[in-house]
Image (cartoon, grey):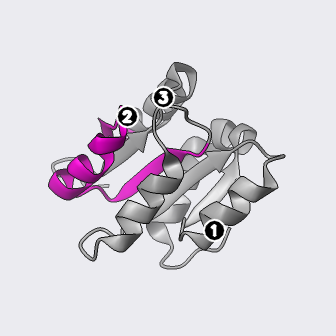
């Protein structure tokens, strides 16, 4: 990664435990994190911040991840940004709906927690990923 021009990742994760996991996994490798704390932050920060990746918590109660997916995929300037999402593994409908809306990769909360950096790098380095 180029340290003079760090890769920006838009993180729409309000769970402090998971946000800390993302931060601790990615900052040492030179990634720059931009936090989306509310629904309106996602489109605003995706448009202005030119993120290389968006991380979504599909179970977040503050940010409607499905609306975020629809908004990002509907905007031609933003639709190519890869999206890494995580959700509770037993929520099959959430996984299926996220895939239908165009999420790049969706994993369980446990896998995301255990493999954050590897998953981010996998999504960033793969042109097409199917969950």
Could you give the CA–CA distance between mark 1 and mark 3, rounded to whole angstroms? 23 Å
Residue 12 coordinates in the image, percent (x, y): 42, 40
Which residue is at a point 51% across and 73% down the rendered structure image? 126
**Residue found 53% across the figure and 71% down from its top:** 102
Mark linked to residue 19 = 3
User: What numbered label is drawn on residue 119?
Assistant: none
Label 1 and label 2: CA atoms lie apart by 28 Å
107 is higher (above) or lower (below) than 15: below
Query: Counting residues from the N terminus, which is met first, the one under dot 1 or under dot 3?
Result: 3
Q: Disc 2 versus disc 3: distance between alpha carbons? A: 12 Å
**What SS does tag 1 mark?**
helix
Q: Looking at this view, is 4 or 53 the one in front?
A: 53
Q: Please count the marks in the image.
A: 3
Identify the magenta region.
Answer: 29-58
Residue 99 marker? 1
For the residue labelled by badge 2, is the local secondary structure a helix, a strand or a loop?
A: helix
Mark 2 lies on residue = 27
Q: Nearer the viewer, residue 29 or 50?
A: 50
Residue that appears at 55% across and 69% down: 101
Query: Which label's residue is closer to the chain start, 2 or 3?
Result: 3
């Amino acid at each position: 990664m180029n340290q003079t021009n760090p890769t920006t990742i838009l993180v729409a994760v309000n769970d402090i435990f998971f946000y800390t996991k993302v931060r601790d996994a990615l900052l040492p490798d030179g990634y720059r994190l931009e936090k989306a704390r509310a629904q309106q932050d996602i489109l605003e920060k995706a448009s202005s911040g030119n993120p290389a990746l968006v991380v979504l918590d599909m179970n977040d109660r503050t940010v409607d991840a499905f609306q975020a997916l629809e908004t990002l995929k509907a905007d031609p300037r933003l639709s190519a940004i890869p999206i890494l999402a995580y959700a509770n593994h037993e929520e099959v409908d959430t996984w299926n709906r996220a895939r239908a809306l165009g999420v790049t990769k969706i994993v369980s909360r446990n896998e995301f927690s255990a493999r954050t950096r590897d998953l981010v790098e996998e999504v960033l380095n793969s042109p097409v990923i199917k969950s």
